[in-house]
Image (spheres, helix red, strand yellow):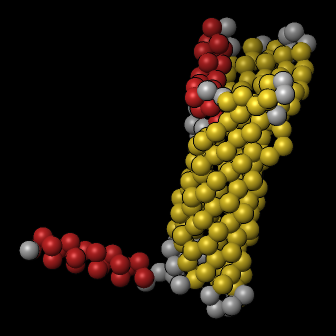
């Protein structure tokens, strides 16, 4: 009985703490442009390859004043652009591929809102989000073929995000939320690791960098 009372007391205190914050929920529609590159360099020569994709997405979010949790879907739009340059063999190519891809996206962000006017709040944001590929298909000839699990993992992304947003209240409860973020890729894919090992074999330098730009607009309701 004492354990039950203790649990109920803890839940009551946590609930009281949560409701002391301004809480809201809503959805956001966004566009993200991403780039991921790898480079091997030795002396004056280098080999560099890069992949660029763009996605659009829709996420639902829960906002507890100083923290936001999101979950939703991203869909690849346009073609996947791949560039390759090798100065030693004088190769410089750019290819575009028809790819269909769908991602589960999850994110958690900290934010610090402050009022500009009675109806406008602005806030910086910092956090992590994850792109998990659910389905990836490449066009081969006239058909799209499913990318197998190992190759699909190359689309996994873990991002460190930083940016800013604002809430424009159109009523006491409803608001419009534009936002913009810049993200840096944190995870290392199999191709990243393989390219790093190749650089070691040739006693060369290896570097990689992945980044994204994200802009979006959402609508929320304050409880």
Residue at x-position 77% and y-position 40%: 53
Q: Is residue 155 visible?
A: yes
User: Residue 31 location, x and y as percent?
Assistant: 76, 55
Residue 96, placed above or below residue 30: above
Residue at x-position 20% and y-position 72%: 7
Could you tell me which quadrant the N terminus lies in? bottom left
Q: Quadrant of the rendered structure where residue 43 is?
A: top right
Residue 64, placed above or below residue 184: below
Residue at x-position 53% and y-position 59%: 108
Residue at x-position 57% and y-position 37%: 187
Q: Is residue 181 visible?
A: no
Residue 139, placed above or below residue 9: above
Q: Nearer the viewer, residue 149 or 34?
A: 149
Horizontally, is 109 left or right of 180 in the view? left
User: Residue 163 location, x and y as percent?
Assistant: 68, 61
Residue 118, placed above or below residue 80: below
User: Residue 188 location, x and y as percent?
Assistant: 58, 32
User: Residue 190 location, x and y as percent?
Assistant: 59, 25
Q: Quadrant of the rendered structure where residue 140 is?
A: top right
Total of numbered circles in the picture? 0
């Amino acid at each position: 009985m004492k354990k039950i009372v203790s649990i109920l007391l803890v839940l009551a205190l946590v609930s009281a703490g949560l409701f002391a914050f301004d809480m809201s929920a809503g959805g956001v529609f966004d566009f993200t442009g991403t780039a991921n590159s790898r480079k091997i360099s030795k002396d004056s020569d280098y080999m560099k390859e890069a992949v660029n994709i763009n996605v659009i997405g829709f996420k639902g979010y829960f906002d507890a004043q100083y923290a936001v949790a999101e979950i939703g879907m991203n869909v690849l739009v346009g073609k996947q652009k791949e560039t390759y340059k090798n100065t030693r063999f004088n190769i410089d190519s750019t290819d575009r591929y028809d790819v269909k891809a769908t991602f589960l996206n999850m994110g958690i962000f900290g934010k610090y809102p402050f009022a500009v006017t009675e109806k406008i709040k602005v806030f910086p944001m910092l956090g992590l989000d994850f792109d998990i590929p659910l389905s990836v298909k490449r066009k081969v000839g006239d058909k799209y073929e499913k990318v197998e699990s190992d190759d699909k993992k190359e689309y996994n992304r873990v991002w460190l995000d930083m940016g800013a947003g604002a809430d424009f209240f159109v009523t006491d409860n409803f608001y419009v939320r534009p936002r913009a973020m810049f993200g840096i890729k944190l995870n290392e894919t199999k191709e990243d690791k393989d390219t790093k090992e190749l650089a070691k074999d040739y006693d060369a330098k290896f570097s990689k960098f992945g980044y994204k730009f994200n802009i979006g607009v959402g609508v929320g309701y304050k409880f």
